[in-house]
Amino acid sequence: MENQTIIDLNLHLSSDTTALVGRDRGETLAKKIFTPKVAGIPKELEAKYKVIVINIPPRIVSMNKSYFLGFFEAIIQRLGRDAFLSKYIINGSDYIKNKISSYVEAALLKSSQGEILDVD
């Protein structure tokens, strides 16, 4: 097993992007990055590398929860909190790094939005 691989989001984002928002956009970027032609599906990368580093360019000052969940939710649910946090290192602005823990917790919630809000 190799030590680490780096996924540089700068290579996949528009040069004028400063914020990452929207679940669908997160899902789209994950599909773009984790294709066999580019990097391999997450399970293949996880088997090959001890650590997967995701570098978010400095110009990206914000990533909302929806985007994060679109990109990482399935991975977090499959690996669990601790394995995800030890396998995936996310480098970005201080704001983004400070939000990661709560976003990971949100990915682990099994309740529907209606159940959380106590509505039908």
Image: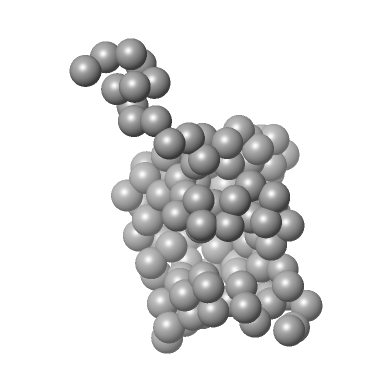
Quarter of the figure with residue 105: top right
Q: Where's residue 103, x and y in %?
A: 56, 38
**Picture residue at 59% right of the left edge, 51% below the top:** 80
Residue furthest toward the top? Answer: 118
Residue furthest toward the left? Answer: 120
107 relative to 17, above or below: above
Q: Where's residue 102, x and y in %?
A: 60, 33
Between 101 and 91, the one lying in front of the other is 101
Between 109 and 58, the one lying in front of the other is 109
5 relative to 119, above or below: below
**Picture residue at 61% right of the left edge, 73% below the top:** 46
Instruction: Judge from the rendering whether residue 28 lies leftward or rightward of residue 45; answer left or right.
Output: left
**Picture residue at 33% right of the left edge, 27% below the top:** 113
**Picture residue at 60% right of the left edge, 67% below the top:** 8
Between 65 and 20, the one lying in front of the other is 65
Between 70 and 106, the one lying in front of the other is 106
Counting labels gives 0
Q: Where's residue 78, x and y in %?
A: 51, 57
Give the color scheme: rainbow, by chain, secondary structure or one colour. one colour
Q: Where's residue 81, x and y in %?
A: 63, 47
On the question of residue 46 being in view, the answer is: yes
Quadrant that contains the C terminus: top left
Quarter of the figure with residue 117: top left
Quadrant that contains the N terminus: bottom right
98 relative to 53, above or below: above
30 relative to 34, above or below: above
On the question of residue 21 being in view, the answer is: no
